[in-house]
Amino acid sequence: MPPKKKKKIDYEALRSSHMKIPQMKVDIARGLLDIGIKESFELIGRAPEVILEEMLRKQPALRTIPDIKERVSLAIYFVENEEREPHKLKLSYWSSL
């Protein structure tokens, strides 16, 4: 039986400031990096739909993440607000909009 291949680890995405955002997935952090958003503050004032469209154009495989829009919306809320409401840091809040 051949040895299992190790899964590649995206250290750049893991080390990015995006990973400090609650509920952030490494694949989404990679998508943000790929569209030129290197730091989380660059999300301020951006529309989640536009960011999502750019990310999906670059990485169509991100469509397989069922709650990607909610995660991007949460990320924007997180970076735009210093005083955050705890219930808005949950994906369920963003999926109900």
Image (spheres, rainbow, N blue to C red):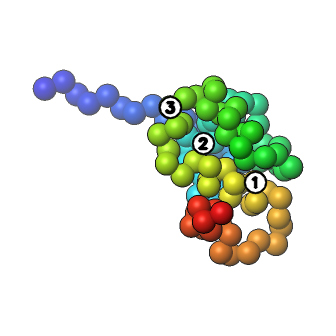
Viewer-nearest residue: 77 or 14 = 77
- Residue type at mark 3: give it: Ala
Is residue 19 in sight in this rendering? Answer: no
Which residue has dot 3 on it?
Answer: 61
Residue 68 at least partly seen: yes
Residue identified by numbered label 1: 76
Tell me whether the residue at label 2 lies in contact with that at label 3, contact meaning CB atoms closer than 8 angstroms: no
| 95 over 47 or under it: above or below | below
Circle 1: residue type: Ile
Q: Residue at x 83, y 67 (%)?
A: 82
List the residue tagged with mark 2. Answer: 28
Tell which circle, 2 or 3, labels the residue nearer the N-terminal end.
2
Quarter of the rendering occupied by the N terminus: top left
Which callout, 2 or 3, points to the residue nearer the camera? 3
Q: Residue furthest right?
A: 45
Disc 1 or 2, which lies upstream in sequence? 2
Disc 1 to disc 3, how far (Cα)? 22 Å
Q: Are marks 1 and 2 in contact (CB under 8 Å)?
A: no
Point 61% across, 32% down: residue: 56
Q: Which of the labelled discs sits on residue 87, or is there none?
A: none
Distance of mark 1 from mark 2, alpha carbons?
13 Å
In depth, the one of 10 and 36 nearer the eye is 36
Locate the C terminus by quadrant.
Answer: bottom right
How crowded pointer 3 is (Cα within 10 Å; few <14, some 14-19, many 20+) is rated as few
Residue depicted at x 59% and y 61%: 95
Give SS at disc 3: helix
Query: x and y percent of residue 19 in the render?
Result: 64, 50
Choose between 18 and 86: the one closer to the eye.
86
Dot 1 crowding, Cα within 10 Å, few <14, some 14–19, many 20+? many
